[in-house]
Amino acid sequence: DDPRVREMAIRIRDSLASRGLIAIESVAIQAIAFDKTAATNWKVAWHQDLLFPFAKQVRSAGYSRSSEKDGVAFACPPVETLESLSAARLSLDDCGPDNGPLRVSPGTHHEGVIPGDRIRDRVAASGEVVCTHRTGDLVLMKPLLLHASSQASAPEHRRVLHFVYHSGPKPAEPWHREV
C-alpha cells in the first residue's frame, strides 16, 4: 500500500479519463510491478486475466475459481464485471521485439471468457500484435484480451507497472483495495 503507487494510479486514471478512454469514476483495484531481466526471463502463454483481488473469500453467485495468494483472496468475477475492467501498463524501460514484449490478439476481448482449449484457435483466427514500447509509454487493454509474452532473446530490464481499473456498478463482493 505504497502512497507513490496510489498517486501513480490516480494520475494515470485522470490522464486516461481526460482523453475519454476510461470513466473518471474508475477505481484502481490492482497494481502489479513486472521486472523481466536476464535472471528473471519468463514467458507467459496466451491467456486472459480472470482472477482479481477481493477483500475476503468470495462466496457470491456468479463468482468462480476462489483462491488465496499471499493472504489475499482472489476470484473470477462475473463476465459483466470482467468486461468493465481496463488495464493500463506503464513502461519504465524501452522494450523492443527481442526483449519479450507483450503480445495481444486483437478483438478477442469481445468474446467473453474463452475456454482454455479454444485459445490457440482464437489467436490463429484473430492474429497477433507485438507491443513494443519506449520508456513512459502507456498501453491500455482489456484484461479479457488474449495476451502473452515470450522469453527475451536479448534480455534487458523490462519493467512495467500494471494497473487494473474498474468502472461501473460496484460488484457484489468488495475489492481488496480501491484507489
Image (spheres, helix red, strand yellow):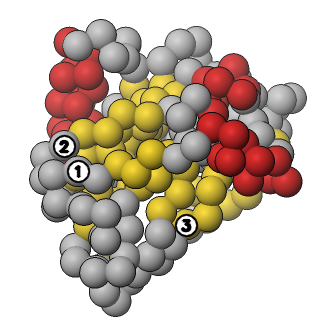
Question: What residue do we see at 55% from left, 66% from top?
Answer: 44
* Residue 27 visible in the displayed image: yes
Question: What residue do we see at 73% from left, 53% from top?
Answer: 120
Residue at mark 2 to residue at mark 3: CA–CA distance: 21 Å
Circle 2 residue: 137
Picture layout, residue 156 above or below residue 52: below
Mark 1 vs mark 2, foreground winner is 1
Residue flagged by tag 3: what amino acid is it?
Val
Q: Residues within 10 Å of mark 1 (few under 14, many from 20)?
A: many
Dot 3: what SS?
strand
Residue 17's disc number: none
Q: Is residue 8 left or right of residue 97?
A: left
Residue 44's disc number: 3
Tell me whether the residue at label 1 lies in contact with that at label 2, contact meaning CB atoms closer than 8 angstroms.
yes
Circle 1 residue: 133
Which numbered disc flags the more N-terminal residue, 1 or 3?
Answer: 3
Residue extending furthest bottom? 39
Residue at mark 1 to residue at mark 3: CA–CA distance: 18 Å
Dot 2: what SS?
loop
When asked about the image quadrant of residue 143, the answer is top right
Residue flagged by tag 1: what amino acid is it?
His
- Quadrant in which the C terminus appears: top left
Q: Nearer the viewer, residue 11 or 54?
A: 11
Q: Position of residue 86 (x, y in %)?
A: 46, 30
Picture layout, residue 134 above or below residue 39: above
Residue flagged by tag 2: what amino acid is it?
Asp
Picture layout, residue 114 above or below residue 80: below
